[in-house]
Structure formats: C-alpha cells, structure tokens
Image (cartoon, rainbow, N blue to C red):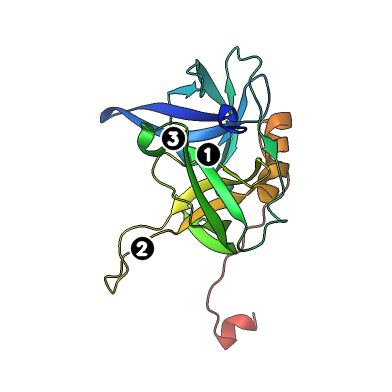
C-alpha cells in the first residue's frame, strides 16, 4: 500500500522489418516530474513507450539514457507532475533471510502484482543478454513483465531492480522453481545519477583480450 503508487507498468511498441510487436515490463518512479528506472532490455529498440501508473494515468515516455552492460535504463514520462517517487534503500545492508517484496506487471496484464519472498543469496554472478551482472537472488515470484520493477525491503525502500529468473528444467530433468534475481540498488545508484546529470554513464572501461601464448611468442 505504501509503495504501489511509485511502481509503473511499461508497454513498448517495436517496429521492425517483420512488422510491429509489443513487449511489457515494469519500472519505478524516482522523481515527481516523471523520471523512471527500468531494465534496458525492457525498452531496447522501442519506438513508442507508454507508462501507466497504478491510478491508471498514462504517459508517453522516452529513454533519457541507458547502460546496457548493467541492463539499466532511465526514462522520462512526458508532462508528468506530482508523481509519487520511490525511496531508495541499501542493498548492501541486506542479509540472507531478509524478507523482500516485488511489485510489478507480470505477463504484461497483471499490473500492481505483489509477490513476497526472501533474500536467498547475494553476489550471484548472472549472465543476461551477454552481460555478466552481480545480482541478489530471491525466491519472490518473478515472471515475464516484472523486469525493471522494484524489489522492496520491509521498510518500503527499493533495494533491487528485478531483472531475471531461472526457469524450465536442468539437464538432468529437475524442475527449476523460485530462483529470481535483482540488480542491487547500491551497484547502480551512481549510474542512475550519471544518467540524470549527463544522459550517459561517465568513467572509463578497460578492454582485455586473453589468448594462449607459447614460449616463443612470450619472449617477443
């Protein structure tokens, strides 16, 4: 009840050579004038992005900036005022066993859905869309459409961005259940500030290429 008005449903229209498609996701408000955080993979290649608040108000949004290596996007809802912003907490303060709540738009149809679980693990290395990201593991139910939505602690503070889940079966045929992941908010809060201030993430990246060397090549 305290947090749901700061969560939005996101609908994305994508036009390609194959025609027009639609996808959906979630996000959370970080300013009264309509800055919204979501996953980059939710809005990637989107031509029309629509934000729907819990009260049913709709806004057209645009991508202000993104960092695909951290699956992070900053959106701005056009002409928005008086929105309820979420309170950011500390993911570093979480311990395994803490209770957490996800609110989002699963399946693109069930907006403002709340699921409850626990912090199952921290510092999990998860690969999504080719990027390796540090994640919080949780057993709160996360489904398609939850991506980009907030993971709250019991104080109503955002501690993560729900992003991925394991699903299906293992190679041995065992079913996979209750393994979801969220990006720690402490990892991306500086990036969010950069996107607001500059529209891109500042700082340098170092590229490293590794190859096998024989003794002759190593002496060159």
Mark 1 and mark 3 lie on one chain; the one further toward the N terminus is 3
Q: Is residue 93 left or right of residue 175?
A: right
Q: How many marks?
A: 3
Give the residue number, with chain letter if any, for mark 3.
105
Can residue 74 be seen here?
A: no
Mark 1 and mark 2 lie on one chain; the one further toward the N terminus is 1
Q: CA distance from mark 2 to mark 3?
A: 22 Å
Residue drawn at the location 48% of the way across and 22% of the way down: 52
Badge 1 vs badge 3, beta-carbon distance below 8 Å:
yes
State the residue in front, 116 or 33.
116
Image coordinates of residue 45 in percent, x first then y, are: 43, 32
Q: In the rendered view, tell whether residue 27 sits above or below residue 51.
A: below
Give the residue number, with chain letter if any, for mark 1.
149
Can residue 104 be seen here?
A: yes
Give the residue number, with chain letter if any, for mark 2.
176
Write down the quadrant of residue 48 in the picture: top left
What is the number of the mark on residue 132? Answer: none
Q: Which element type, helix, strand or loop, lies under badge 1?
A: loop
State the residue in front, 71 or 10.
10
């Amino acid at each position: 009840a305290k947090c749901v008005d700061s969560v939005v449903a996101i609908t994305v229209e994508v036009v390609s050579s194959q025609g027009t498609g639609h996808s959906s996701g979630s996000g959370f408000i970080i300013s009264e004038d309509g800055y919204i955080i979501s996953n980059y993979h939710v809005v990637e290649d989107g031509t029309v992005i629509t934000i729907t608040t819990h009260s049913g108000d709709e806004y057209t949004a645009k991508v202000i900036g993104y960092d695909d290596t951290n699956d992070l996007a900053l959106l701005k809802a056009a002409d928005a005022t008086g929105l309820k912003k979420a309170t950011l907490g500390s993911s570093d303060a979480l311990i395994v066993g803490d209770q957490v709540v996800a609110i989002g738009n699963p399946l693109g149809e069930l907006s403002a859905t709340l699921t409850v679980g626990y912090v199952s693990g921290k510092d999990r290395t998860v690969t999504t869309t080719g990027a390796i990201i540090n994640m919080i593991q949780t057993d709160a139910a996360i489904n398609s459409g939850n991506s980009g939505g907030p993971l709250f602690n019991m104080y109503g503070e955002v501690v993560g961005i729900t992003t991925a889940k394991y699903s299906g079966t293992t190679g041995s045929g065992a079913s996979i259940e209750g393994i979801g992941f969220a990006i720690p908010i402490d990892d991306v809060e500086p990036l969010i500030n950069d996107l607001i201030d500059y529209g891109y993430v500042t700082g340098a990246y170092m590229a490293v290429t590794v190859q096998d060397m024989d003794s002759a090549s190593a002496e060159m």
